[in-house]
Image (cartoon, helix red, strand yellow):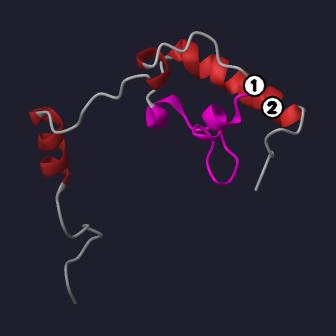
């Protein structure tokens, strides 16, 4: 019998930590701050659909790179658009 003990093959945990420490990952910048969008409008469906998954879930700020201020306004705008039936709740 093999002494496998559930170890995952491929890159080890230490290698992934080293990549993060060495600076391979880039910090995400808020797209709305960069484009100088002051207020998120619930009627701007093109913008809202960029921050919703194909299942209809709001993308987290970790994934989208939004700052806290814009993530809150984005969530409110998406919820308003859903309520008025501009965006679907699920797909």
Residue occupying the point 35% across, 29% down: 28
Image quadrant of residue 75? Answer: top right
Residue 5 or 12: which is nearer the viewer? 12
Q: Distance between the residues labelled 2 and 1?
A: 5 Å
Per the rendering, the mark at residue 81 is 2
| Label 2 close to label 1 by CB (< 8 Å) | yes
Residue 49 or 1: which is nearer the viewer? 49
In this picture, residue 91 sits left or right of residue 32: right
Residue 5 or 38: which is nearer the viewer? 38
**Quadrant (top left, top right, bottom left, bottom right) of the N terminus:** bottom left
Residue occupying the point 48% across, 34% down: 64
In this picture, residue 73 sits left or right of residue 33: right
Q: How crowded is mark 1: few (under 14 residues within 10 Å), some or many (20 or more)?
A: many
For numbered disc 1, what is the local secondary structure?
A: loop
Residue 91 or 32: which is nearer the viewer? 32
Q: How crowded is mark 2: few (under 14 residues within 10 Å), some or many (20 or more)?
A: many
Residue occupying the point 80% across, 45% down: 89
Q: Does the magenta stretch include residue 69?
A: no
| Highlighted magenta segment, given as a residue range | 42-64
Residue that numbered label 1 is attached to: 42
Whether 37 is drawn above or below 52: the answer is above
Residue 31 at x, y percent in the picture: 45, 25
Q: Does the magenta stretch include residue 51?
A: yes
Image quadrant of residue 38? Answer: top right
């Amino acid at each position: 019998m093999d002494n496998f003990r559930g170890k995952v093959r491929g890159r080890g945990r230490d290698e992934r930590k080293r990549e993060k420490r060495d600076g391979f990952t880039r910090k995400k910048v808020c797209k709305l701050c960069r484009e100088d969008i002051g207020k998120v409008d619930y009627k701007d469906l093109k913008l809202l659909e960029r921050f919703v998954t194909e299942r209809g879930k709001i993308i987290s700020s970790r994934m989208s790179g939004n700052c806290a201020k814009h993530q809150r306004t984005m969530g409110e705008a998406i919820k308003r658009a859903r309520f008025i039936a501009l965006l679907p709740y699920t797909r």
